Image (tube, rainbow, N blue to C red):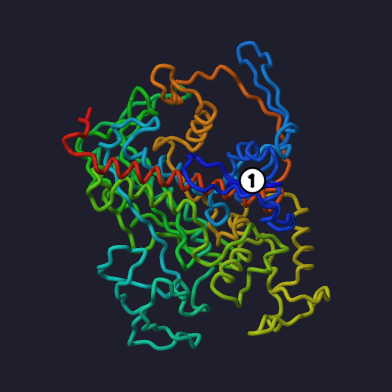
Amino acid sequence: MASTLDLTPRATTARGVGSNADTIPPVITYTAAGSAFERATQPDYFGWLEHIRAAAGCTRPIRLAGQLLTVDPSTGRVLDQRNTDAMPDAAIYTACGNRRATVCPSCARTYQRDAYQLLRAGLIGGKGVPATVAQHPAVFPTFTAPSFGPVHVRVVKRHTCANRKRCDCRPEPCHARRDTGLCAHGQPAVCWARHDPSDAVLGQPLCLDCYDHDHQVVWNLFSGELWHRTKQAAERHLAKLARRRGIPRVEVVTASGITRKVPPVRLSHGKAAEFQARGAVHFHALVRLDGVDPDDSAAVVPPPAGFTVADLEDALRAAAEQVAFTTPSHPDRPEGWPIAWGEQLDIRPISLTGRGEVTDSMVAGYLAKYATKSTEVTGHRSVRLDADTIGDYADPDGDHTARLIDACWRIGRPTHTSRPLLDRPRDHRPRPGFVERWQCPDCGTHTRYAACPVCIAQRQAGLDAEPRKPATTNPYARLRRWAHMLGFGGHFLTKARRYSVTFQLLRDTRVSFRRHEDQVDEHTGEVLAVDHLDDTTLIVGTLTFAGVGWHTTGDALLANTAATLARERRTTGQEELAHELATIPADAAPAAA
């Protein structure tokens, strides 16, 4: 007999008829429901749920096998020994940790919350950051890419909607031009449509042949260097301002024991990259102005008196206007490509009182949200491309995204390769409604790919066998590595070393709390904080990789169901807590320390 008890344990009990009617449904193990029922009827089911709790909501958890040793660090004596063979499924489940919401929503949610705490701590303090940072001038700038050609846009000059995500304001015409009709390629150079927010043509060029796809992917590649130079230029602007105001330089001692004189101010930042619909990245940043402590160069101290938010904004605007450089020479463009910021630059001061237009919680949540996104807004999602898969996505005669990927692969080829690998007769290109087979003129292979996969694989194998050269020989080689990211190879969330704490610190704190969450104070009955716990043992693991993913679809169904219920309970608790804090009478609120 099998009972229809709840597949996940309930936190509370209630009166009434329970779901415990004894029935014997058919066991069909090749379906998700059948394999889930078989798992749920096993006697160790609740032990299995507790075992997989660390990776319950993960889409593709990592399975580890081996043994865990509990060691006394003072004596080196082994106190306990556990092997994964005695555990459920003979493996330890750990979350994949992927930050992309489209790949693993559960791990991306954890990453987003950690990013929020990390970014907000750099504005108001906490997590090891001194609370005095709340007194530092801070701004929220947005740096955009320049124009590489006209694209379909939706511009609203004045918003009257309450929610920008559901904006129903009347936009301006896309590209209203009365002095032009057709471009040099015979395509309309105007667009009088007022696009909806969900219009699929947003971000698409008015003419694919007029658009400079090569310049855009190169700009994405060098955008990180452009940001680095912009920050340096802003710091030089502030150093000159301090010198004009008579503020002396500060003497600090480096780690090697050398005494140096440095400017009295410096910038600390947290930055998130976001893809626009056209496939170009732009940066949202939290920039904070700090001072320099002569006794401890790593300390976070306020800037000298007299520096304001206006000084910080002027420094960033001046740096964005003057910073520009030209990329190294390339066989396709010997003079290189110019790299500079676009005309749209938005800099807003951050309010720490919660009443301004841009608050600390708002910007931290905004950047944390975009840290879990990637190229989804462009409609392209793929893993890293190679010689075998590039033909599925790159096409010099294809749509906007296909041409961007083709530009990455073509420009990123070895510099001594005079003929691009995708230069083949164009008569084999797919036609609307039917993909024709064509024969490679070099090897005679019949294929429907845009380029012959046999020739590309042979050519790539020959290039891989050649001796590796320094990375400075071809600075564009990274375009092939990041072709699936449209040329952008940087991380989507970066920060200065002194801006805030690290992700590793937050993860270690969470691990320590989970290990001791059952320990309570003997006098108060409250759960002990991590700071109050004393780790007297050391856990040493000799684990090896055993696989990726759940064993069955039923296991995935049960694990994700349990994780969903846990997230719902957590969300409900947060909403109730926010409601209680918001309804506390003003005379009952605790006084500020």
Residue in the picture at 68% in, 50% down: 37
Q: Nearer the viewer, residue 16 or 42?
A: 16
Most extreme residue toward the left, as rendered? 587
Q: Is residue 107 visible?
A: no
Residue 486 sits in quarter: bottom right
Q: Secondary structure at mark 1?
A: loop
Instruction: Mark 1: give few (<14), some (14-19) or many (20+) Cα within 10 Å.
Output: many
Amino acid at the residue labelled 1 = Pro
At x 74%, y 60%, the residue is 460
**Residue 355: where, in percent of width, then height?**
22, 48
Residue 417 in percent (x, y) is at: 69, 64
Which is more toward the observer, 384 or 247? 384
Where is residue 195 shown, x and y percent of the image? 38, 77
As drawn, is 518 to the left or to the right of 198?
right
Q: Quadrant of residue 269?
A: top left
Q: Residue at x 55, y 28 (%)?
A: 515
Quarter of the picture containing the C terminus is: top left
Residue 340 coordinates in the image, percent (x, y) = 41, 59
**Rendered view: 527 above or below 568:** above
Q: Which one is nearer the viewer's eye here, 334 or 192?
A: 192
352 relative to 441, above or below: above
Residue behind mark 1: 61
